[in-house]
Amino acid sequence: MIRRGLLSIVRSVYDPLGFISPFIVKAKIIFQNECRRQENWDIQLLDHNLVLWQRWLSDLKLLQDFQISCCYTQAGLSRTASAPLHHFCDASQSAYAVVTYLRTVDQEGKIECSFVCGRARLAPIKIRTIPRLELCAAVLAAHADTTVRRELGVPLEDYVFWTDSMIVLKYIGNAGKRFHTFVVNRVSAVREVTDMKLWRRVSSEQNPVNDATRGVTASQMLEDCVWTQGPRFIRLPPEYWPKAPQVDRELEGDPEMKRGVTSLTSIVHRT
């Protein structure tokens, strides 16, 4: 197997809504590992990558049994009382991703959670820090909210964003323009379309995006996969959700801070 053939097969898997993104990302990671060699497109895969690729191809056949509901709500629900979107984002050294669920509550208090869409991107070959990658995931979540609202074509009254990164919450919540350009641009992109008050922290163990940043097997996709089902807690009333932590906005010593630059917040207070 050559790298060109690997890419051709991966691109042939049609999954526009990201149902099986956690499985596809495993093949993309293999492809990226081969790209790091900076070799010819027609060179044979390294032995260990070839083993991983053959295992992935074998797993791909199992997904013919993959099923997911086409309906966002079940027939048992009465008239909808609220239907907010919940976006979860995360990153690893290999990939960053977002997944969106619609949490429907009817007038009798019954709650359902349905998968809307997901997206996973490979981390750049040029190594970036985990905080920067997690910030890229936050931007992906903000864009997902805008896209889903536009494409669904129905009024959605609210949204919630979840991340397991405290440093991302600090970046988004800090109004000072004291960061390096990379962070400033992405924080601005997030703040333009989201409300900081609706960003919450979830533990890494409860974050369904972990599946898409590390990859899962086809058999795991066919089981009770948290990626497609959503975390259990959002099927509960908000008082049972992970408690929103107090975000300490002090970032002294953070490597993304520009030295000797006064924040926008400080200027406002002085005037």
Image: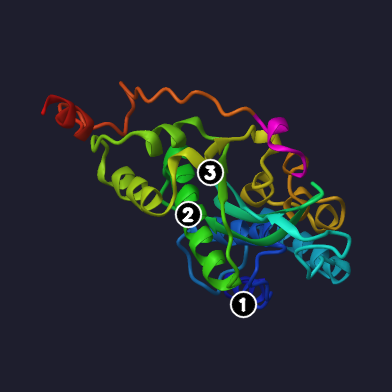
Q: Residue at x 30, y 50 (%)?
A: 185
Question: What is the quadrant of residue 3 in the picture?
Answer: bottom right
Q: Is residue 189 left or right of residue 11?
A: left
Q: Is residue 158 left or right of residue 142?
A: right
Residue at mark 2 to residue at mark 1: CA–CA distance: 30 Å
Q: Residue at x 57, y 56 (%)?
A: 157
**Is there a contact, CB below 8 Å, between mark 2 and mark 3?**
no
Question: What is the quadrant of residue 22 in the picture?
Answer: bottom right
Per the image, the residue denoted by label 1 is 8
**In which quadrant is the C terminus drawn?**
top left
Q: Examine the rendering and report whether any part of residue 55 can be seen.
A: yes
Q: Residue at x 39, y 35 (%)?
A: 173
Q: Residue at x 70, y 34 (%)?
A: 205
Say which mark, if any, is on residue 142.
2
Q: Is residue 53 left or right of residue 219?
A: left
**Residue 23 forms part of the magenta stretch:** no
**In which quadrant is the N terminus drawn?**
bottom right
**Is there a contact, CB below 8 Å, between mark 2 and mark 1?**
no
Q: Indicate the position of residue 163 as horizontal and vertical percent values.
A: 56, 40
* Element under disc 3: loop
Say which mark, if any, is on residue 93.
3
Q: Earlier in the sequence, mark 2 or mark 1?
A: 1
* Element under disc 2: helix
Q: Examine the rendering and report whether any part of residue 261 can be seen.
A: no
Seen from the viewer's position, the closer of residues 2 and 11 is: 11
| Residue type, numbered disc 2 | Ala
Say which mark, if any, is on residue 113.
none
| Residue type, numbered disc 1 | Ser
| Residue type, numbered disc 3 | Gln
Q: Give the extent of the magenta segment.
A: 235-242
Instruction: Give the number of marks.
Output: 3
